[in-house]
Amino acid sequence: MPTTSPKSQHVLVLNCGSSSLKFAIIDANTGHEIISGLAERLGATTPSIKYKFNGAKTVINLVAGQAHAEAIDTLVSLIKDHSLDEQLIAVGHRVVHGGEHFTQSVLIDEKVIAGITQAATLAPLHGHANLLGIASAQASFEGLPQIAVFDTAFHQTMNEVAYLYALPYKLYTEFGVRRYGFHGTSHFYVAGQTAKLLNQPIEQSNFISAHLGNGCSVCAIKNGKSVDTSMGLTPLEGLMMGTRSGDIDPGLFNFLTTQLDYTAQQIDNLLNQKSGLLGISELSNDCRTIEEAAVAGNKKAILALDMFCYRLSKQIAAYMVPLQRLDAIIFTGGIGENSDIIREKVISLLAFLGLDCDQKANLNARFGQEGIISSSQARSKAVVMPTNEEWVIALDAANIAKEL
Ligand code: ADP
């Protein structure tokens, strides 16, 4: 029995981080993952690739110092060994920053590479990794169309009132300093799925989606389009996150440099790696660990969770300004999909928006289970919707490849 139908549309999805590479081969028709895995600690002393295929998990240790190119070489051998290359129709790349240039997914050619290279100045670590991934995949899968799917693209419908910082205007026109937003693929996907779940057209849907993973962002979606989002020029702005501070007083920079002799790099490290849930709890960036400690009475863990929910709720409430009418709030990402504690807290802080929480439905919505967690009387619904960025990337890549 063949495991795939002749019409299957297998796409290799690559998501290159600065020291990691997530990959999957996905059937764009069904979202089914044929193989998936993660290469991590790339460029460090103990790089490795973990992958799942046919229900079995395997680990391959790479040689110390090996990075993206070698990880992709190993991945190519793996794919060929299992004859998975025969049905591949495209490679889809998650690209973190598309700047203002890319408002949708595109077939990668030299001009697109130049555009991604230009946008990479706004997110050097991620941008460099994305370009490396594209170059390696082009060398290894010659002849297969390569498609770029941008984290920023969905938010290109924001208007300038929402995306400009109140800074000298020239910083925007000359250097592209503005708010771009991230997690766009996820916000787009969960909004579409929620419209289906609620049986209403996405073009007439007003949602606020909260993508809560290690990085966290909220998006205001009006008539199916992003009108505001909490991340900005970089993925540091907005909500409190696992290790990122989110919004702070910009005056902190002056204080840290003049009073505490911090360098720019130390400040960047403080705000990106040492803050957020980890900074306040002094325990962990992992929400599960913090929830367990909070249940056991740990005061800093309780404070970290309270701050997380308070700041998230404030941001959601602020988005009532552009939306005016709210059909649903959507929880997604590892925390949004699993933490009934955080969902209940946020909903109770936002009860004035006509939200409520059905305890049983809230407890049941976890481990990839979608569902409405508000009661039938709620004026605005609360929804848990598992995200699937890889599938969106596979679908976009398959659709573009089909047109060639
Ligand atoms: P990433 O942004 O790296 O993709 P994820 O979306 O996987 O991250 O989210 C990771 C976060 O989800 C972690 O903080 C983790 O603790 C949290 N999480 C996962 N499962 C649960 C759970 N059952 N309860 C609470 N938090 C959870």
Image: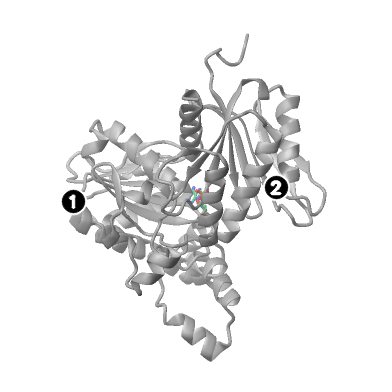
Which quarter of the image is occupied by the N terminus? top right
Which residue type carries mark 2? Answer: His
> At 66% from the left edge and 29% from the top edge, which residue is drawn?
53
Furthest residue toward bottom: 259
Q: Which residue is mark 1?
A: 354
- Badge 2 marks a residue whose secondary structure is helix
Please report contact status of discs 1 and 2: CB closer than 8 Å, yes or no: no
Question: Would residue 49 appear left or right of 374 to someone viewing this image?
Answer: right
- Badge 1 marks a residue whose secondary structure is loop
Which residue type carries mark 1? Answer: Gly
Mark 1 against mark 2, which lies toward the viewer? 2
Question: Would residue 299 appear left or right of 222 to someone viewing this image?
Answer: right
> From the Cβ of disc 2, is ligand 1 less than 8 Å away?
no
Q: Where is residue 317 drawn, in percent x and y?
A: 25, 59
> At 29% from the left edge and 63% from the top edge, which residue is drawn?
314
> At 47% from the left edge and 85% from the top edge, which residue is drawn?
254
Question: Would residue 188 appear left or right of 390 to someone viewing this image?
Answer: left
Badge 2 local density, few (<14 within 10 Å), some, or many (20+)? many
Q: Where is residue 288 drawn, in percent x and y?
A: 51, 54
Task: Check the image and report above or below for 87 versus 154.
Answer: above
> From the Cβ of disc 1, is ligand 1 less than 8 Å away?
no
Where residue 55 sits, quadrant-wise, is top right
Q: Which residue is mark 2?
A: 68
